[in-house]
Amino acid sequence: MAVKHYDFPNIGVVTLYKRRNARSIKITVARGNNIRVTLPPWMPYSAGVQFVKSKQSWILDHQKPVEHITDGMAVGKAHRLRFEIDELTSKPSSRITDTEVRIVVNSENQVCHTGVQKIARKACIRALRQEANKLLPIRHKQIAEKYGFTYTAPQIKHLTARWGSCSHKKDITLNLFLMQMPWELIDYVILHELAHTRVLNHGANFWNEMEKHLSNPKSLRKKLREHQPVF
């Protein structure tokens, strides 16, 4: 699926997708205010850009206030976010330890400032990347060997709208935001992408492959849709 990202001054980054089975242009505002535009494969990206511009009022009406990152929030499987007040610091900074994402500011009033929240969000994503690079390849190997899949180590990336992907060359990519998910759903995504190494589409053969290894794959898919890859 072809993808492009465009940054609009008033509404933020919009992701444009070309889908093989799309018949018309469609726009959605997902959790975390992620804006997604789906296009038929024959439609130019410029048409999607113009469509977004014409829908700016609708998008702004459907975007929700951004939730602030707060002290004590869980980050992945091993970290907690901590804001520290240091009146001697001249500017906000971040540091990641084995168990914490620490954001140092010189005033409690700074915590909700846009710039500090941006620093905190980036630091949390770095922590998630560290965890994902450490844990996801191990989990991927375990599941592949358990169910008899031939595999290579997955790539770990920051994806904005997908939990994982499998190319026609059988290269698997996993989203670092999986570290925010329950292990049950992490395992489902890994198995889902491994199944694509045998069946690349989502037809009946694919779900037959999934049901060889899981008794409830569609139930897990439904649970997965309740989550979005955002922090």
Image: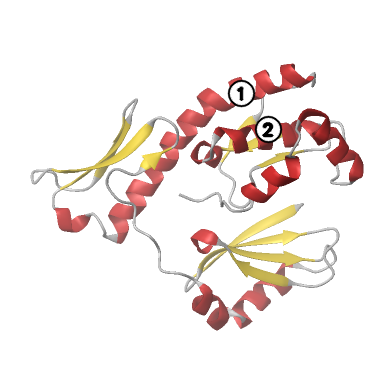
Mark 1 surroundings within 10 Å by alpha-carbon count, few (fewer than 14), some (14 through 19), many (20 or more)? some
Q: Position of residue 52 (x, y in %)?
A: 62, 75
Residue sitting at x 47%, y 74%: 10
| Neighbours of disc 2 within 10 Å: few (<14), some (14-19), many (20+) | many
**Is 205 placed left or right of 46 in the picture?**
right
Label 2's element? helix
In the rendered structure, which disc, 2 or 1, sits on the residue that comes first in sequence? 1
Instruction: Please identify the quarter of the rendering in which residue 164 is found.
Output: top right
Instruction: Name the amino acid, label 2.
Output: Ile
CA gap between label 2 and label 1 equals: 8 Å
Q: Type of residue at label 1?
A: Arg
Q: Nearer the viewer, residue 201 or 169?
A: 201
Residue 34 image offset from top left, x and y in percent: 55, 61
- Extreme left residue here? 88
In the image, residue 176 sits, relative to residue 140, either above or below, namely below
Vertical position of residue 120 compared to residue 155: above or below: below
Residue for badge 2: 190
For the residues bearing labels 2 and 1, Cβ distance under 8 angstroms: yes
Q: Is residue 20 left or right of residue 15?
A: right
Residue 196 visible to the viewer: no
Residue 104 seen in the current view: yes
Residue 35 place in picture, x, y as percent: 58, 65
Image position, residue 202 (x, y; %) = 84, 46
Q: Which residue position holds label 1?
A: 139
At a point 44% along the width and 41% down the height, the residue shown is 125
